[in-house]
Amino acid sequence: ADVRHGKACACHRVLASSVSSKVNEEISDSLHQQIVDLVITYTKDDKASVKESACVALGAAVGSSIDPESCLRRVETVFINIMQSSQERMEIHKAVASGLCVALKLYTSDNKVLFFGKNLLDASLRLAMSGTQRVQYAFNDVLWLALGCGNEDGGEGGLESYLQQASFDNSKAMKSVHSKVLSRIQTVDI
């Protein structure tokens, strides 16, 4: 378990570092896919420490990918299955939030709502509104980054982009979370 945990941590550190773009240009796409496959395997590990580090590493793998959009679509169900499981420990949900924050921080395009997608935003919203307070805080950070609340418009553009695709109930909930919680967050530290 310690070796698997160490490998997942190493994947996260290398892929999330400032040199990852240089490393990523030099490694082949197939090697990146092998890293993603390894980390996905670790997200199913029976040891919590391995699973936690794998969730964060998976976010780093998405954000540092040459094609982050397709990489996220490939691993989206892994994140969502963990997020929807009521059996998961609080630490695992927080690790998923950390991984998603890493992916959002590494992704350089402006439209993070489009990148993230409706399904991940809906699942993040659900966890930001329910569960333990620590999980709520972690997913508030995810939503803050995804909606671009740190931008000049305070996330209004990201919110509008989400509202165009969300259901009525989720639109109402996101507006409430945005005005009552996200607008008060100054910055997000990962």
Image: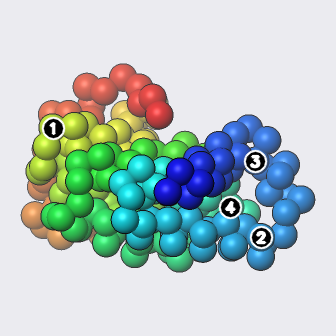
> Residue drawn at (15%, 37%), measured in percent from left and top?
133
For the residues bearing labels 4 and 2, Cβ distance under 8 angstroms: no
> Where does the image place residue 176, in percent across and percent down from the top left?
13, 44
Q: Amino acid at mark 3?
A: Ser
Q: Which residue is mark 3?
A: 20
Residue 90 vertical placement versus 41 (above, below): above
> Residue drawn at (30%, 46%), measured in percent from left and top?
91
Residue 16 vertical placement versus 73 (above, below): above
Q: Which residue is mark 1?
A: 133
Q: Which residue is mark 4?
A: 65
| Disc nearer the start of the sequence (4/2) | 2
CA neighbours of label 1 inside 10 A, class few (<14), some (14 to 19), many (20+): few
Mark 2 and mark 3: span between their CA atoms?
13 Å
| Disc nearer the start of the sequence (3/4) | 3
Task: Give residue 148's quadrant in the image.
Answer: top left
CA neighbours of label 4 inside 10 A, class few (<14), some (14 to 19), many (20+): many
CA neighbours of label 3 inside 10 A, class few (<14), some (14 to 19), many (20+): some
> Residue drawn at (67%, 66%), measured in percent from left and top?
35
> Where does the image place residue 161, in percent across and percent down from the top left?
36, 58
> Where does the image place residue 122, in percent across and percent down from the top left?
26, 63
In-front residue for pair 122/157: 122
| Disc nearer the start of the sequence (1/4) | 4
Q: Secondary structure at mark 4?
A: loop
